[in-house]
Amino acid sequence: MKGALVDRRLRVLAELRRPTPPRSQGTAAIVDAIAAALADLASLAAQSGHDGEGLIVRGTGVVVPGIVDEPTGRAVYSENLGWRDLPLAEILTERTGTPIALGHDVRSGALAEMARGAARGAKDMMFMPIGTGISCAAICDGHLISSGGYAGEIGHLTLEPGGDPCPCGANGCLETVASAASIASRFAARSGHPVSGAAEVVEWLDKGDPDARAVWDEAIAALAGALSMAVTLFAPELIVIGGGLAESGDRLLIPLNEALLQRLTFQRRPRLVRAALGDGAGCLGAGILAWSQSATT
């Protein structure tokens, strides 16, 4: 979990980071951890400011993964966190005494990249973080597509029919081939070398290891296939790649861009760039939601 105090100009005044409780501990433990983090941020605000006067918190934004229905403040579904139809905004408002603006982590990250990051000035863009999972946010003609919270689940496009099982219940989803976790597990299974994450696979790739090359190329091909579908549907002028896998830089972006363009014929040919805000995009996006809510209340 990442948290921050941000002012009206979206300047970060204070930050905190802490681990999310594992799903095995249950929904209540995760909600408790979120509420505790918000309480600690409120304490940081009270201790900040000038001349001994604390900062006044005007609003609070919380963004989470999965299916999120922003207007009703409900976390509809999250496989990774193990919750279903959770009235999270209402629960946290009761726990903290502060109105909560609930959002989706990737859609909020897209707003942040448009406001302060790599997508400034873009009207048609996609933001796709690649980490433990893969999701995306599409902004068309300046409007964020939500569709009741179900839009953007690009990680669950079937890229390998009959492939590895996905926690969503399907087989061969993009996440089973190209998420950071899947890259690590596929390399370990193929090579017999256990690794702690995709970053170690990149190290083997740099050494010229053929198993790392095969796994990496399969991930690139799957990502390019999914993005070509998205480009055909949404026609973004810009695709911003974020998440932990984007830390590999040109090792990812150059071959992914080439593989994507090879799949396009008549479609708009987007620019593909690395996210500018790193893993802080969702956190800053939560601040944007909070300030937007405070302006309307």
Image (tube, helix red, strand yellow):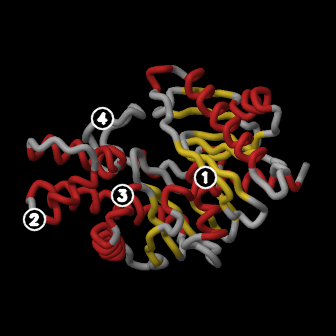
x then y, percent, for residue 195: 20, 44
Specify few, some or many for label 3: CA neighbours under 10 Å numbering under 14, 14-19, or 20 or more.
many
Secondary structure beneath label 1: helix
* Residue identified by numbered label 4: 165
111 on left or right of 30: right
Specify few, some or many for label 4: CA neighbours under 10 Å numbering under 14, 14-19, or 20 or more.
few
Specify few, some or many for label 1: CA neighbours under 10 Å numbering under 14, 14-19, or 20 or more.
many
Depth check, mark 3 against mark 4: the one in front is 3
For the residues bearing labels 4 and 1, Cβ distance under 8 angstroms: no
54 on left or right of 66: right
* Residue identified by numbered label 2: 208
Secondary structure beneath label 2: loop
The residue drawn where x is 27% and y is 52% is: 198
Q: Is residue 160 visible?
A: no
The residue drawn where x is 48% and y is 20% is: 25
Depth check, mark 2 against mark 1: the one in front is 1
Cα separation between marks 4 and 1: 31 Å
Secondary structure beneath label 3: helix
Cα separation between marks 3 and 2: 19 Å
